[in-house]
């Protein structure tokens, strides 16, 4: 299924959309997920993962970093670590984690852990695609940096895109 995210009639890059699927078994993806540190920034700025996923935090910058999250979601502090080092965090419950570096206050990112295999982050044009969604009616949730979480209903299999709009 495909869709788009907008806020005030403009594309909403970095919006996260997921479909609730409470009857599916819990199984995190086997692939490696990375929240990189380079050029004194986190990349990507917004990352969405399934609950249980281990995220790598490599330091591919020229300086030391100390990655942490102390509010909401997953709380952790990876301590100070040098260039070329990788630390890991398992996001073991649903929620939003705000990620920072205590050495470089301008560095910030978000990790959204969801308890469903049906999720996506919107690209810079606000477009997203969620693959392998069985035909059914779902409750969807949508979040964006600085905005409220939206909730609605969506019937997949109709061919109609999911249009998520913040006022």
Image (cartoon, grey):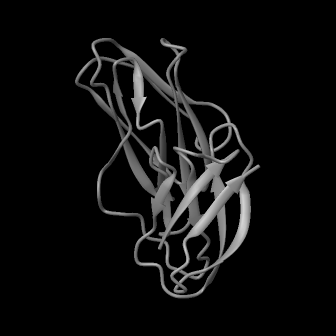
51 vs 44, left or right, is right
Q: Residue at x 35, y 13 (%)?
A: 64
Residue 93 appears in the rendering = no
Q: What percent of the width, then of the height, locates residue 97?
A: 59, 40
Q: Residue at x 55, y 14 (%)?
A: 105
**Vertical placement of 143 versus 158: above or below?**
above
Query: Residue 39: percent from the left, percent from the top?
Result: 34, 18
Relative depth, front residue between 20 and 130: 130
Q: Residue 44, located in which quarter of the rendered image?
A: top left
Vertical relation: 94 (above or below) 74: below
Whether residue 142 sits left or right of residue 101 in the image: it is: right
> Is 57 rendered above or below residue 125?
above
Q: Residue 103 location in percent, x, y?
A: 48, 11
Query: Which residue is at 39% across, 17% downward?
Result: 40
Residue shown at 27% from the left, 24% from the top:
60
How many badges with numbers are in the image? 0
Examine the rendering and report whether any part of residue 116 can be seen. yes
**Residue at far left of view:** 84
Q: Nearer the viewer, residue 152 or 118?
A: 152
Q: Is residue 46 above or below residue 82?
A: below
Place of residue 163 in the rendered image (x, y in percent of width and height, measured from the top left): 62, 64
């Amino acid at each position: 299924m495909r869709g788009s995210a907008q806020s005030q009639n403009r594309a909403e890059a970095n919006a996260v959309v997921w479909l609730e699927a409470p009857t599916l078994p819990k199984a995190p993806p086997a692939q490696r997920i990375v929240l990189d540190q380079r050029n004194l920034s986190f990349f990507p700025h917004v990352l969405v993962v399934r609950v249980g996923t281990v995220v790598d935090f490599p330091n591919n910058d020229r300086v030391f970093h100390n990655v942490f999250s102390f509010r909401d979601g997953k709380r952790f502090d990876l301590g100070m670590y040098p260039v070329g080092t990788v630390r890991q965090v398992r996001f073991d419950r649903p929620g939003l984690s705000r990620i920072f570096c205590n050495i470089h206050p301008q560095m910030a990112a978000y990790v959204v852990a969801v308890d469903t295999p049906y999720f996506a982050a919107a690209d810079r044009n606000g477009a997203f695609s969620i693959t392998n969604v069985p035909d059914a009616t779902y409750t969807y949730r949508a979040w964006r940096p600085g905005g409220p979480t939206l909730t609605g209903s969506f019937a997949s299999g109709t061919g109609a895109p999911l249009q998520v709009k913040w006022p």
